Image (spheres, helix red, strand yellow):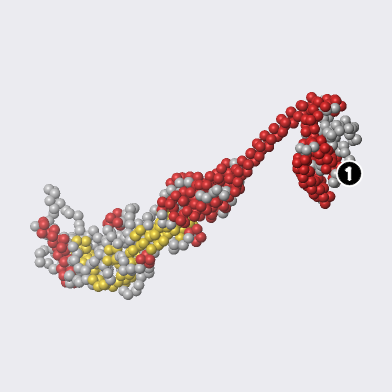
């Protein structure tokens, strides 16, 4: 039988052409000829696709699919339904064929072929069976045609196709396996359904940081941080667990800091993260420097100042690392504490810094006065005042550099307690009958000045231009004259009634309160006027100066002494006595050097002299002068009666 479509020679028992798949029988014998015809044509076209073209073996196995085939429209659905129905009919026909084939194989086979329904799977099976049955009977035309189309290429194509299929299969398996592994790793690293502890999150965050995945690394690091912070809360009073949790916080925050730096996220969060690190672990000195560097570059000086003030002075490593940023606190030459007198404080600091201070405890950064001279500490209380605050001065100091960065604020608390707010002067005010020395306690570095007035009139307040008090000659300042040293006399209560004022002024100009004393000194007279005259007369006799008006010097003569008046000089009361006495003359001598005897008064000169007799201690002072109505008493000539008597007794 010859195929009407391709012209290939076919055996009579074939139903379809083995070359093109054309139906060799009449369509009338099928239940649905149109469907079977369509299927046959499709199979034929498919077989044509596998024909050798002697060019490329790979193309022989390439099947171009019409994508529209998968779009199931109404017509395609109708064809599919028909094919399913024919498949059912085919299975039933084959069952009937097997039952009847034993009786009359040839006849039944013919009848079965007439009743056979199209089945695609059976079609290919029939093709294979037909080849086996025909074997060598297959037409030479078909064989020659196949040989003409290069059987060598066909075999090669078949082998190549098998090899390619194997390689494709292997590649597919490898790709799928790699895909599953990658997907598993992706889930492991990103879904994080397996992460439950701090260590889990930290490990993943660190791994992602090393792979430069900063966003996901930061996210997991923050999750680890929350775990650590929760552990601190759960630790409660358990210091060991709290310490361990804080160590985890420091560890993960250090990782977060590295993430910020590598991702160039240098902002306030970056600094705040480092602040927590140094708060929890002061040994992390490198973060102190990073914070200071950031604040100096991006923030106002006050923020850098506030941070530097949080650094503990005992953290020597941190202080050393911040030496280029920290401003040294000013130092005072007076330690804080209690003092018994007012004083001034000298402040020192770095030469390129200014110093600001307050004495009322307020903030020197805001309300401070710039330091230019020692700070005077004048606030005090007396021992009788039990309110301590009355005598306390709170000195606060701060240093500021050229960049307006400040040091820490240092506070010095001074308490001044005085026995009295005014100078301590003895004796107290009152009435006295003996000469009494006035004494004033003068602290080191201070000077005492006083004023005095007679009667009830008050003198002016003393100052540096007033008379200065000295307790003894050893207290006199250097550079004074010898005359002043010789004439020095300690301060005493003056005769009569007087009011005196005293004040202390220290080396810094700090003034004390003014002490006021009122004294009345009434010294009793130990000698009368007549006794004063007799004392002068006795002194004239002793000095061999006594003489009468006639110039006689014999024994028993009467000496005349005149009382002028009573005066007070240098706080002493004197009787002024005028006496006629022999004028001193040159001593005449004989040839042998013996003095010439003056038994007569011929040629003797007389003169009138003034004497002062102290009414208290009977001291006789010779050669008193009167200059313009003011009596001048020479100190050197003063000889007390007591001393004269003592000297006479000693000579006797």
Left or right: residue 375 compared with residue 587: right
Residue at left offset 33%, top offset 68% = 386
> In the rendered image of this protein, does residue 83 appear above or below residue 152?
below
Q: Count the numbered circles shown.
A: 1
Nearer to the camera, 599 or 572? 572
Task: State whether residue 387 is above or below residue 257.
Answer: below
* Residue bearing the label numbered 1: 28
In-image side of 6 versus 330 (left or right): right
Question: Where the C terminus falls, by quadrant?
Answer: bottom left
Task: Give the image quarter of residue 17.
Answer: top right
The reply, left or right, for residue 186 in relation to residue 645 is right
The residue at 82%/50% (across/down) is 78
In this rendering, is residue 279 above or below 545? above
Mark 1 Cα within 10 Å, few/some/many (few <14, many 20+)?
A: few
Q: Along the line of sight, which residue is nearer the eye, 238 or 520?
A: 238
- Whether residue 52 is visible to the viewer of this picture, yes or no, is yes
Looking at this view, is 382 or 154 the one in front?
154
**Residue 48 position within the rendered picture, expressed as x and y whole percent measured from the top left:** 84, 35
Give SS at disc 1. Answer: helix
Q: Position of residue 299 (x, y in %)?
A: 57, 53
Residue 213 position in % (x across, y down): 61, 44
- Of residues 288 and 567, the one drawn nearer to the viewer in this rendering: 288
Residue occupying the point 79% across, 36% down: 105
Q: Residue at x 38, y 63 (%)?
A: 392
Percent position of residue 150, x then y:
82, 25
Q: Which residue reaches farthest front?
A: 103
Check the picture and name the quadrant holding the N terminus: top right
């Amino acid at each position: 039988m010859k195929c009407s479509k391709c012209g290939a020679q076919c055996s009579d028992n074939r139903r379809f052409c083995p070359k093109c798949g054309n139906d060799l029988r009449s369509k009338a014998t099928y239940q649905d000829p149109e469907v079977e015809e369509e299927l046959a044509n499709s199979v034929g076209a498919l077989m044509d696709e596998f024909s050798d073209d002697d060019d490329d073996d790979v193309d022989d196995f390439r099947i171009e699919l019409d994508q529209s085939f998968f779009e199931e429209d109404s017509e395609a659905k109708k064809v599919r339904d028909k094919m399913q129905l024919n498949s059912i009919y085919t299975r039933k026909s084959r069952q009937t064929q097997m039952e009847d084939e034993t009786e009359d194989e040839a006849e039944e086979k013919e009848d079965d072929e007439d009743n056979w329904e199209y089945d695609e799977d059976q079609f290919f099976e029939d093709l294979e069976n037909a080849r086996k049955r025909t074997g060598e009977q297959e037409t030479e035309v078909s064989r020659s045609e196949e040989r003409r189309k290069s059987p060598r290429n066909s075999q090669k194509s078949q082998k190549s196709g098998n090899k390619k299929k194997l390689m494709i299969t292997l590649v597919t398996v490898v790709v799928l396996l790699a895909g599953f592994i990658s997907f598993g790793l992706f889930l492991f690293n990103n879904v994080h359904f397996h992460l439950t502890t701090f260590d889990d999150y930290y490990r993943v965050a660190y791994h992602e940081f090393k792979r430069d995945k900063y966003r996901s690394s930061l996210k997991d690091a923050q999750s680890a941080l929350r775990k650590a912070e929760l552990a601190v809360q759960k630790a409660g009073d358990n210091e060991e667990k709290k310490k361990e949790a804080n160590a985890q916080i420091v560890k993960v925050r250090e990782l977060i800091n590295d993430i910020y730096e590598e991702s160039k996220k240098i902002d306030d969060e970056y600094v705040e993260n480092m602040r927590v690190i140094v708060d929890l672990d002061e040994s992390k000195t490198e973060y102190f420097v990073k914070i200071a560097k950031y604040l100096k570059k991006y923030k106002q000086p006050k923020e850098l100042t506030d941070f530097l003030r949080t650094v503990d002075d005992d953290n020597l490593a941190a202080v050393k690392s911040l030496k280029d940023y920290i401003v040294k606190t000013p130092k005072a030459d007076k330690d804080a504490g209690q003092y018994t007198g007012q004083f001034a404080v000298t402040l020192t600091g770095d030469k390129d810094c200014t110093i600001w201070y307050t004495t009322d405890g307020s903030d020197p950064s805001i309300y401070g006065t710039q330091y230019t001279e020692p700070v005077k500490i004048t606030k005090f209380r007396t021992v009788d005042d039990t309110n301590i605050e009355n005598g306390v001065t709170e000195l606060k100091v701060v240093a500021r550099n050229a960049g307006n960065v400040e040091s820490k604020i240092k506070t010095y608390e001074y308490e001044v307690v005085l026995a009295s707010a005014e100078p301590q002067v003895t004796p107290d005010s009152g009435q006295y009958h003996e000469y009494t020395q006035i004494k004033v306690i003068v602290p080191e570095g201070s000077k005492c000045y006083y004023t005095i007035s007679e009667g009830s009139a008050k003198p002016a307040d003393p100052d540096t231009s007033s008379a200065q008090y000295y307790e003894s000659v050893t207290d006199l300042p250097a550079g004074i004259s010898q005359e002043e040293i010789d004439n020095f006399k300690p301060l005493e209560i003056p005769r009569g009634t007087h009011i005196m004022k005293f004040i202390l002024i220290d080396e810094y100009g700090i003034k004390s309160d003014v002490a006021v004393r009122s004294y009345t000194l009434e010294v009793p007279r130990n000698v009368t006027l007549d006794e004063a005259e007799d004392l002068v007369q006795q002194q004239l006799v002793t000095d061999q100066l006594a003489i009468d008006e006639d110039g006689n010097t014999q024994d028993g003569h009467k000496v005349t002494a005149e009382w002028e008046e009573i005066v007070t000089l240098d706080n002493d009361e004197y009787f002024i006595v005028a006496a006629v006495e022999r004028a001193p003359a040159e001593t005449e001598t004989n040839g042998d050097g013996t003095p010439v005897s003056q038994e007569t008064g011929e040629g003797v000169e007389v003169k009138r002299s003034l004497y002062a007799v102290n009414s208290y201690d009977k001291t006789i002072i010779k050669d008193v002068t009167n200059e313009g109505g003011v009596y001048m008493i020479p100190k050197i000539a003063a000889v007390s009666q007591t001393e004269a008597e003592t000297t006479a007794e000693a000579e006797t």
